[in-house]
Amino acid sequence: MQAQELLPVLGAHPFLEGLPAAHLARLAEGASARSFPEGAFLLREGGEADTLYLLTQGRVALEVHRPGRDPVQVESLSGGDILGLHWLFPPRRWVLDARAVTEVRAVGLDAAHVRACSDAEPALGYAVSLRLLRQLYARLERVRLQRLDVFNLDGAAP
């Protein structure tokens, strides 16, 4: 898919919804359509964090390795979510695995391109940063709720 063909997909994704057309066009220059079959890894712990995935369809399990034991699933993502935040800061390495639970379709945004566009166009950088902060806040809230559930084992009010 060419950048022009990806514009409607980018504009419809909740992460980029409402972004001005010029900003979408700049991001589309570094975008590519991606698909992953069930069981495939979208990213692997320790690998280079070089892509921001905008999930459009399917379900992804985020897994953390435990020495000598099976990986543990820490979160599940689906269409409308984003995957991959470690491209923002050095050392730019993934800290977990992301495995397709079902067939997954996504748009991959080249992280170096997103960083370069954000540096060159402060309004675009600000808009992307706000959206990333919103995602981080939502994930922290989910973790908080999960922790409350873990500590409330007997069903009593905390």
Image (cartoon, rainbow, N blue to C red):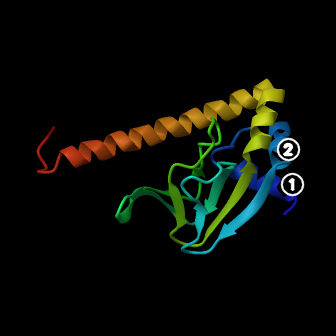
Q: How many marks?
A: 2
Query: What is the quadrant of the C terminus in the image?
Result: top left
Say which residue appears at 69% left-offset and 43% top-offset. Answer: 16
Q: Earlier in the sequence, mark 2 or mark 1?
A: 1
Report the front residue among 46 and 155: 46
Q: Position of residue 13 (x, y in %)?
A: 67, 51
Q: Amino acid at mark 1?
A: Ala
Along the horizontal axis of the image, is 126 left or right of 41?
right
Say which residue appears at 85% left-offset and 38% top-offset. Answer: 22
Q: CA distance from mark 2 to mark 1?
A: 8 Å
Q: Position of residue 18 (x, y in %)?
A: 71, 39
Mark 1 Cα shell of 10 Å, populated few (<14), some (14-19), many (≥20): some
Helix, strand or loop under label 1:
helix
Q: Amino acid at mark 2?
A: Ala
Helix, strand or loop under label 2:
helix
Say which residue appears at 86% left-offset and 54% top-offset. Answer: 3
According to the image, label 1 marks what residue?
Answer: 3
Q: Quadrant of residue 92?
A: top right
Q: Position of residue 144 (x, y in %)?
A: 34, 39
Q: Position of residue 91 (x, y in %)?
A: 62, 39
Along the horizontal axis of the image, is 30 left or right of 151?
right
Query: What is the quadrant of the N terminus in the image?
Result: bottom right
Q: Are marks 2 and 1 in contact (CB under 8 Å)?
A: yes
Report the front residue among 59 and 71: 71
Mark 2 Cα shell of 10 Å, populated few (<14), some (14-19), many (≥20): some
Report the front residue among 154 and 37: 37
According to the image, label 2 marks what residue?
Answer: 25
Say which residue appears at 77% left-offset and 32% top-offset. Answer: 118
- Above or below, 146 against 70 in this view is above
